[in-house]
Image (cartoon, rainbow, N blue to C red):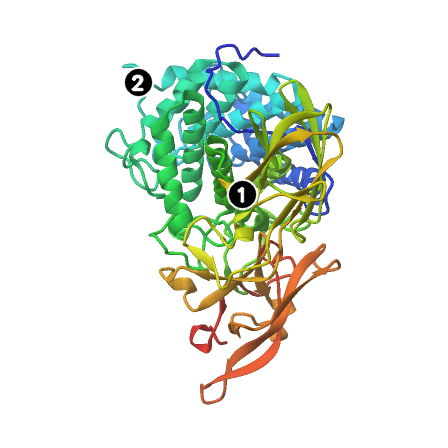
Amino acid sequence: MLSAAGLTSHDYPFRPVPFTAVHLDDAFWAPRIETNRAVTIPYAFGKCEESGRMDNFERAAAVLRGENIANRKLPGYPFDDTDPYKVLEGASYALAVQPDPKTSAYLDSLIALFAAAQEPDGYLYTIRTIDPQHPNHWDGPTRWLNDPQQSHELYDAGHLFEAAAAHYQATGETNLLNVALKEANLLCQVFGPGTNQLHLWPGHEIVEMGLAKLYRVTGDRRYLDLARYFIDVRGSHPGGDDYHQSRIPPVDQTEAVGHAVRAGYLYSGMADVAALTGDRDYVHAIDAIWENVAGKKLYLTGGIGSVPRIEGFGPDYSLPNRTAYCETCAAVANDYWNARLFELHGDARYVDVFERTLYNGLLSGVSLDGTTFFYPNVLESDGTSARSPWFGCACCPGNITRFLPSVPGYVYAQQGETIYVNLYAGGNADIKLDNRLIKLTQATRYPWDGEIKITVAPDKTSRFAIAVRIPGWARNEPVPSDLYRFADTNTEPVTLSVNGKPVGIKLDQGYVRIDRLWKPGDVIGLNLPMPVRRVMANDKVNADRGRVALQRGPIVFCAEWPDNPGGKVRNLVLPDGQPLTARFEPGLLNGVETIAGKAFGVTKDANGQLMKTEQDFKAIPYFAWANRGKGEMEVWLAESESSVTPP
């Protein structure tokens, strides 16, 4: 095992309980994580082979052996290397929980292939190695020189580093880690403030996060210093722009701009470096940017990125629904960022955004059977949107495969003598608190039901605190800003108890802290009422003016074509005050809660006059849409004829 000697004393003050110590057995997340392990990961590896991504490594290795490959098919995108890396990262997380000799052997064969494609000095970027005299048009004439614009050499390296850290931590083997460290050492030689080093920023961020992970694994300070350099060099000389978050130095930025995935990875990398160095300037910057996103640029589903042309952020309050981009990768990046902000501040509002994104804008990116995907996640469809079995640019499926296995790692966190309960899902966790072991067992049907029972079993009776998160949606606050609001106030109270005795709801940063002498068998009871709620957007959001969305618990709902008369939903009117009821349908979409009631369908008569007809109405969870073929879908429903889109 490698030594981590030399690690700074700084790190995140609120530490997540590792996903390997949290075992979910609920009816919501456990099946999805298993589908990801048993179906999506093998499927994605197969698509990487079928599409030539593995062949790129084979061809690069052949070139390095001096073989002639002139007649073989040209490679695709310069970032295709990252797709096998991301799926391998997800497979490593899955192996950490459930050993699988067949998968382990397959990963070892891939790692040998990656190593064979690596040039002697550590450079690993197959598209240039295959034909260095004729680089892809995205690349510069020599290594690195076009990276701030289109080259993805550093982006590819970042995903390699993330995969290597995951594989090492899952297996204890160093075969992939050695490949990553060889390239990381090359980057330390090539980039930096020295007179003989290159002063360039990564065109697509993530290498910063990857270097921080390598630093945590090895304790080699060079990796942390280089991560910081790649952040600080942005905006330091001409050529930067908002698209790449490089027009001004990141510490001076206060608004989310440019490509949303790049931005989310940058802010996550800044959080990592801030935590590991204690740099408060980074924290001030990402806090200000977060306020801008949460208050002006966040979709109700937790998606980010409203402009398809740049796959990124638009002006404040510009949140169109039919052309929403909300890339699946951006949802993943948004959750990485919000998780890190919680780890910096211990404030539940970041978990509120994390949860909203997780259950809605992120989970919508993969089908229920785990084999088709969304790249953008629109909030309104005219019937042309459909999931795809793969993409030419296949960043999103790989991100799904690596994120889903890690979900249990976001359920709990700890700081000092306090355990934080952040997410609710049935299962158990073994949490080390100093020299004690505390077992927590959750029993709940969340997100369909707000009744939660947490059994506490310390290995010995002892005093510590458990901080129970009261979600913003349960406190009449859909998001931690005025961007969205509930149309009415739910007066049914949240209740909390220990061993049946009520505990007062006294909030501290969104948590109720229960500090007591805990003994085995103590039970925390939490009830979060889940009425159907109507959500309104800030009046400055033009796209949602005169419209209403539906939410129950953490789940955002949508109207979809198979559930509504005539397969039409874009012409629906859902007036204020119309009664709505929720019920669980075990036979629909693998088992989901639905919302039903009466609405009005608006059509035009022969004279072009609007006609309004009462009809049955039904809504399903947004994450489950587009699993039954193409058709109309709507999240924001008109409240009157003046806002409707009649056929």
Could you say whether the residue bearing mark 2 is in a helix, strand or loop?
loop
Q: Residues within 10 Å of mark 1 (few under 14, many from 20)?
A: few
Give the quadrant of residue 505: top right
On screen, residue 73 versus residue 591, left or right, reads: left
Give the quadrant of residue 246: top left
Amino acid under label 1?
Lys
On screen, residue 138 versus residue 103, left or right, reads: left
Give the quadrant of residue 105: top right
Residue ID for mark 1: 506
Could you say whether the residue bearing mark 1 is in a helix, strand or loop?
loop
From the viewer's perspective, is residue 540 above or below residue 124?
A: below
Residue pictured at 35% horizontal, 40% vertical: 288
Using the image as rendered, state which of residue 87 and residue 489 is in the foreground.
489
Mark before the other along the chain sequence, 2 or 1: 2
> Looking at the image, can residue 592 be seen?
yes
Circle number at residue 181: none
Residue ID for mark 2: 193
Amino acid under label 2?
Pro
In which quadrant is the N terminus drawn? top right
Residue pictured at 39% horizontal, 18% vertical: 225
Q: Nearer the viewer, mark 2 or mark 1?
A: 1
In the displayed orientation, state which residue is furthest to the left.
238
Q: Residues within 10 Å of mark 2 (few under 14, many from 20)?
A: few
